[in-house]
Image: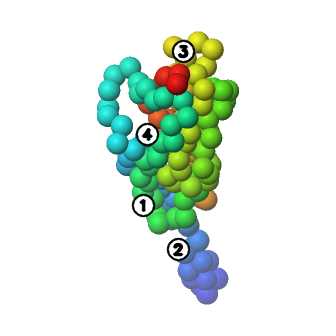
Amino acid sequence: MFVLLALGGLGAGCYPTPNHMPVILKGPRPLGSPSTPGGLKFEEGTEIQLQLEVKDQDNDEVFFRWSQVPAEPAGAFSSTTVATPTWTVPSPPEDPNTPIYLYVEVEDGNDGILIGQSPAIFVIPK
């Protein structure tokens, strides 16, 4: 009888609580940019403040990784590991109709990963 009680006691507390994925509440997008169909247009060399608001229901520490697609011509992030970096618009792509997308990978450190995508960004030459 003692063995059964001991095993039952161990089993009750051994199940970890499930992890909840982080949730993107706003962004990723240039701060103050309108929601317009067809994408956003910015002049090359413009420094843009990026907007991202994330919630993690478990209050886990959240980590960020920003990237740009296509990678060339490369814009410049002030940091790729903070929630709201700035991004400097690169020179226009060879095809001016090629959009640039900014991606942010949001990870909560407990295998909860979410990827957010900005609206299409088109570069206006100076």
Q: Are marks 2 and 3 in contact (CB under 8 Å)?
A: no
- Circle 1 — which element? loop
Q: Dot 3 corresponds to which residue?
A: 96
Please name the residue shown 64% across and 82% down the image.
Answer: 3
Which is nearer the N-term, disc 2 or disc 1?
Answer: 2
Task: Please state which of residues 85 and 9 is positioned toward the viewer in this rendering.
Answer: 85
Badge 4 or badge 1: first in the primary sequence: 4
C-alpha separation, residue under disc 3 versus residue under disc 1: 41 Å
**Is 107 in front, or is 29?**
29
Dot 3: element: loop
Left/right placement of residue 23 relative to residue 62 reads: left
For the residues carrying marks 2 and 3, which lies nearer the camera in this image? Answer: 3
Which is in the foreground here, disc 2 or disc 1?
1
Asked if the residue under mark 1 is in contact with the one under mark 2, i.e. CB atoms within 8 Å, the reply is: no
- Dot in front, 3 or 1: 3
Amino acid type, label 2: Ala
Q: Which residue is mark 4?
A: 29
Q: Residue at x 61, y 35 (%)?
A: 75
> Amino acid type of disc 4?
Arg
Q: Nearer the viewer, residue 10 or 83?
A: 83
Label disc, if present, on residue 57 of the rendered structure: 1
Q: Amino acid at mark 3?
A: Pro
The CA span between labels 4 and 1 is: 22 Å
